[in-house]
Image: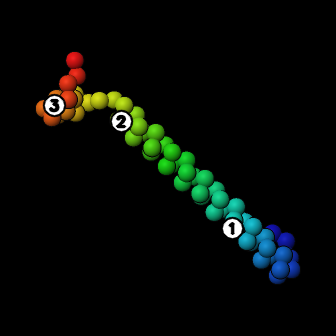
Amino acid sequence: MTAMEPETAAITGTVMGVIMVMAQIREIIAVTAQVMATEMETEMVMHPETIMAEKGMGADYE
């Protein structure tokens, strides 16, 4: 990096910091969405044990 005025360096540093934070937030959102999608898939697929447990509680799957 070339030498620059202190003010310019501070502004550049702030801008780079903001960009990095935005990238991290975007990554967190992506991971959260992926986890939620996985949980939804898990709920959609009923496991035999779950069906048996629910049958025991009065739910009937015919």
User: Residue 40 at what x, y percent from top left?
Assistant: 41, 37
Which of label 1 and label 2 is nearer to you? 2
The crowd level at tag 2 (other Cα within 10 Å; few <14, some 14-19, many 20+) is few
Q: Colour mode?
A: rainbow
Q: Is residue 52 visible?
A: no
Q: Quadrant of the C terminus?
A: top left
Q: Position of residue 60 (x, y in %)?
A: 20, 24
Residue at the spot of label 2: 42
Q: Secondary structure at mark 2?
A: helix
Q: Residue at x 78, y 70 (%)?
A: 12
Q: CA distance from mark 1 to mark 3?
A: 56 Å
In the picture, measured across the screen, residue 26 lies left or right of residue 32, that is right
Q: Distance of mark 2 from mark 3, alpha carbons?
A: 22 Å
Q: Is residue 61 visible?
A: yes
Which numbered disc, 2 or 3, marks the residue closer to the eye? 3
Dot 1, how many residues are within 10 Å of its Cα: few (below 14), some (14-19), or many (20+)?
few
Task: Mark 1 or mark 3: name the one nearer the start of the chain.
Answer: 1
Residue 7 shown left or right of residue 23 in the figure: right
Instruction: Please identify, in this view, whether the residue under mark 1 or under mark 3 is nearer the observer.
Output: 3
- Amino acid at dot 2: Thr
Q: Are marks 2 and 3 in contact (CB under 8 Å)?
A: no
The residue drawn where x is 64% and y is 56% is: 23
Residue under numbered circle 3: 58
Give above or below for 37 relative to 55: below
Earlier-in-chain disc, 1 versus 2 = 1
